[in-house]
Image: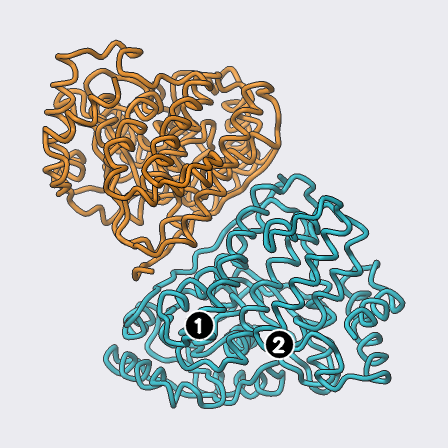
Chain colours: A cyan, B orange
Amino acid sequence: MQNFIFENPTKIIFGRGCISQIGQEIRSYTNKILMVYGRGSILKNGVYEQVSNSLKASGISSVELSGAKSNPTLSLVYEGISLAKREKVEAILAAGGGSVIDTAKTIAAGVMAEEDIWEYFSRRLEIKKALPVFTVLTVSASTSEMNQVAVITNEKTHQKLSMRSLCLLPKVSIMDPSTLFTLSREYTAYSAVDAISHMLEGYFNNTEPDSLLQDRIVESLIKTIMEKTEVVLKNPRDYNARADMMWATTLGFNGLATAGMGQITFPAHMIGHSMSALFDIAHGATLSMVLPGWMTYATRKNPAKFARFAREIFMVREPNDFKAAVEGVQHLRSWMSSIGCPTHLQQCGISGGDVDRIVTNASATAKAVGMEEYTEDVIAGILDRCR
Amino acid sequence: MQNFIFENPTKIIFGRGCISQIGQEIRSYTNKILMVYGRGSILKNGVYEQVSNSLKASGISSVELSGAKSNPTLSLVYEGISLAKREKVEAILAAGGGSVIDTAKTIAAGVMAEEDIWEYFSRRLEIKKALPVFTVLTVSASTSEMNQVAVITNEKTHQKLSMRSLCLLPKVSIMDPSTLFTLSREYTAYSAVDAISHMLEGYFNNTEPDSLLQDRIVESLIKTIMEKTEVVLKNPRDYNARADMMWATTLGFNGLATAGMGQITFPAHMIGHSMSALFDIAHGATLSMVLPGWMTYATRKNPAKFARFAREIFMVREPNDFKAAVEGVQHLRSWMSSIGCPTHLQQCGISGGDVDRIVTNASATAKAVGMEEYTEDVIAGILDRCR
């Protein structure tokens, strides 16, 4: 076990009918907020109405910023910062999934930042203060509802980068699994892949050799997410299955499952982010293409761990570690494909010249964040394994 | 999944050498504290010195209350409340295990309480405020370092009761696994039994039939604690094994593993508390005697769940649920015995008349907390299964 600090004061209010509580939770902080949401799904599924009614009942006035999309953009963040400053709001409410929450977090920090907010991503400046953030979660994948991270795409520079700070942790997050009933098959599957990928990056890319405790927790969460994904793809309104997916996703990336594992790196996310920044491909889709390829690349460095994954998750019986590991990757790719996710670059129309651009983009990020292993050659090799 | 609220802002600073940080953590709250500890083990193992040096370096003055013992007493709590009021301290630091922390929490609440503090236990009044509590953990069993609970024994009335409140959550807990190197074999084993019992009570006594996610997490934690207990009993200075036990214990009872499982009851703890209140038997020892007996009693109500436990934890292959469940209890009892814990009442000198007193005491608690199932007859039947 490596030394660690775990601190996560986000209050989670979980369950059916809980959205009505958002107003009173915000009320103890302020009565003037900016509400951020996406491209209108909350208008159709009743979440907008539930939130509005709750705000009204608690006497909270709000201004709105809509239009946050997958791979949320810096331009929308700038718009939100101007609006928040102009309207003198004192908190940000995100009603949506990870993209909406990341937009809200970045606005919350941007309002109080001394430098341009993008500097905190690109130059990795430290975020020291932010307006309080509240969330009503409607897509469960990023764990942004209970972590310190925000990821934003700069459309001009074609960079998708992250920042993290304790002050970006939401104060309160409302998680009502029934909001997921109307989530499309496609995004349900992407959510599962995103959640599983977060956990697997920690599982494989840590600096603690003796991580049995954390490994078992991650395996428990991944097995549950995989099983329940299959259930909800058959019956999108299965409350218990949606609830298990939602809570397992939060537990997988709120800092608990990786506490004690030392430094975690996210190479598959890094390459996926480059794909999204360049071609605006959904985050989950980039991961279902990249993760198995990255695993094939990484297996030879630690075949025992990859074999453990294969045996624990897919009941692979092969005694040879290397062969078992290879089987595990095949199973994972097949499973991702079975739930409708792309697992080969061609499926998203990525061809030769595009790969070169991804390599250049991702290797620049790798250099900036000190992941020296990921040279242009290595990244090109990984992408070759994703074809 | 049942609706739930999860909120646990305790900051955990985990690892070797971390005790030196306690002063600066307290400093942002106050510079005048009451430090509570036990019966002197921290004077021998260097923890007292580390804490004192850190307080001194941060300019924090402290008054001290020592003497907290297993089954911590109300009389010491009263002494602490008087001292804390007289000295006008603004925070309480607990340096020890669950008994010390529970004493500190109760003092913290007692200083600010309008009624006599015992009323909050006996009449279940709501604790609304408390001084901030900090902990330096030296016995890892109760999870008091990261939960809302305090358990205190009233020596006069022979009651061992608990209270819970969000404001009893410690602000900061320092967990250095090397403080466990000098923990006796006996208390190491009791700690493991206590941690496992907390989790098993939630595992078996909840109101959510579909708890696969939580079950898997609990099974992961229990397996790890059992394996690592065996390691540290052979080598008490195995840092990684101590660390895994310490963190798994915290994760098992900080609210996460039971979130979504509805109402949890603690019948084995309830009966064990009566034993401790009447005969001052160590908490872990009461559980190693009572838990297997209680499981034998409860098996017939839900053989499938008890069979799952047997199969997941002890690899029992028996296909019949009831038979598998019985085998599981036998395995658990043997394991507890193998690590040196008493598993039959006689081993702690409890005989006929004593059992009657336990029955009376525990059934009174059951009535007070609304656990109607646990009549005198039922409790007597359970204790018969512990002989």
> In terms of depth relative to the viewer, which is nearer, A144 or A316?
A316
User: x, y percentage for residue B268?
Assistant: 26, 32
Numbered disc 1: secondary structure: helix
Question: Which disc, if any, is residue A232?
Answer: 1
Chain under callout 1? A
Q: Which corner quadrant holds the C terminus of chain B?
A: top left
For the image, the number of numbered tags is 2
Question: Which disc, if any, is residue A341?
Answer: 2
User: x, y percentage for residue B195?
Assistant: 40, 34
Position above or below: A370 against B49: below
Question: In the current view of this chain or complex, which residue is farthest to the right?
Answer: A377
Question: In the current view of this chain or complex, which residue is farthest to the top?
Answer: B349
Answer few, some or many: residues within 10 Å of disc 1's Cα (few below 14, many 20 plus, some between 14 and 19): many
User: x, y percentage for residue A230?
Assistant: 49, 69
B258 horizontally vs B262: left or right: right
A261 horizontally vs B70: left or right: right
Residue found 57% across the figure and 20% down from its top: B236
> In terms of depth relative to the viewer, which is nearer, B164 or B195?
B195
> In terms of depth relative to the viewer, which is nearer, A357 or B207?
B207
B356 horizontally vs B46: left or right: left
Q: Going from the N terminus, do you reach mark 1 or mark 2 first?
A: 1
Quadrant for residue A62, please give it. Answer: bottom left
Numbered disc 2: secondary structure: loop
Question: Which disc, if any, is residue A33?
Answer: none
Answer few, some or many: residues within 10 Å of disc 2's Cα (few below 14, many 20 plus, some between 14 and 19): many
